[in-house]
Image (cartoon, rainbow, N blue to C red):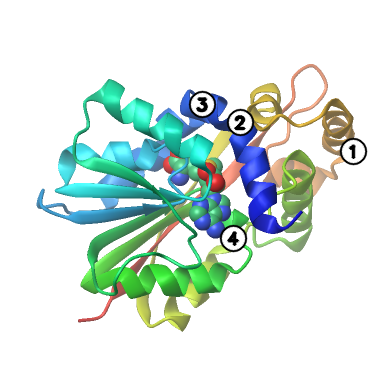
Amino acid sequence: MDRSQSIQRQFGAAAERYATSSYHQRSPDLENMLKAVTLSGSEQVLDVGTGTGHTALAFAPQVGSVIGLDMTEAMLAQARELAVQQGASNVSFELGDAMELPYDSDRFDLVTCRVCAHHFADVQRAVAEMARVLRPEGRLLVVDTVSPEDPAEDTYLNCIELIRDPSHVRNYSVAQWMGMLEAVGLAAEYRGTWAVLLDFDEWVTRMGTPELEQSELRALFDRAPDLVRKGLGIRSGDYYGFEIPIAMVEGHKRG
Ligand SMILES: C[S@@+](CC[C@H](N)C(=O)[O-])C[C@H]1O[C@@H](n2cnc3c(N)ncnc32)[C@H](O)[C@@H]1O
């Protein structure tokens, strides 16, 4: 199975649960993204890896139009239903690959990409594509789960993410993100990090993680060294959960 098939299999089966996921609908991410940009109301927005459309739908009332792009049709079907439920008539959802965006260069005022870049097989290529479709002076807003600067915490986080979801590639550090934006000529700005407490049961149920992998994850949580336990806010024993670091970086396309 190649990477695209792995993603479509994971998210195809999980689409309904992503549509109603409390984290995806209501985490601080969306509020922070909306606060990060000044909007005139006429912007053409592209939301890459839109999933069930939560980011696209959060921006829709404040901009001219939004296209949400994703490679998993079942996620897009849920997004279209949510758009109808919310009466959002300026949003459309299209099938496509972040690494080969089906749009002309210099088209969008704003490109958003929330909690999906850690799935991209070639993230630098996706960043180059997102920069290409931005108009000069346009902005790219990336929000993603990030790896902590401490290498042990980084290893632990990426390991548990991969066991939970085989389509996970890796979380990058903020420094790596800044480098990826600069590498395609964008002026990069770090816009902050926040932690989101993930309830273990919700986290594995949403992705359909099999029972065996759930037990492996619980064992890893139980055995986490003190430094990692503290850094990732790991809870284990009576209640399992952890605090995932989420960061926002912005790229500005020079005029
Ligand atoms: C966690 S969901 C995204 C959540 C969404 N951005 C939100 O704000 O609720 C991850 C999505 O990334 C999509 N995805 C992964 N790799 C992709 C790629 N190369 N091109 C387009 N979509 C991709 C998956 O199909 C999945 O729907």
Does any atom of ligand 1 lie closer than 8 Å to the CB of label 3?
A: yes
Q: Is residue 105 visible?
A: yes
What amino acid type should be assigned to the residue bearing mark 2? Ala
Mark 3 → mark 2, Cα distance in angstroms: 10 Å
| Marker disc for residue 79 | none
Residue indicated by mark 4: 120
Which residue is situated farthest in the top direction here? Answer: 238
Q: Is residue 59 left or right of residue 167?
A: left
Task: Please state, as top left, top right, bottom left or bottom right, where the C terminus lies in the image.
Answer: bottom left
Q: Nearer the viewer, mark 3 or mark 4?
A: 4
Q: Amino acid at mark 1?
A: Arg
**Which of the two discs, 4 and 2, labels the residue nearer the N terminus?**
2
Question: Type of residue at label 4?
Answer: Phe
Foreground pick, 207 / 190: 207
Task: Give the secondary structure at mark 3.
Answer: loop
Marks 1 and 2 sit apart, C-alpha to C-alpha, by 29 Å
Determine the CA span between mark 3 and mark 4.
Answer: 22 Å
Reading the chain from its start, which is encountered first: label 1 or label 2?
2
Q: Earlier in the sequence, mark 3 or mark 2?
A: 2
Please identify, in this view, whether the residue under mark 3 or under mark 2 is nearer the observer: 2
Residue 83: x, y in percent? 30, 30
**Residue that label 1 marks:** 223
Tell me if the residue at label 4 has its CB under 8 Å from ligand 1.
yes
Determine which residue is flagged by label 2.
14
User: Which residue is disc 3 drawn over?
Assistant: 21
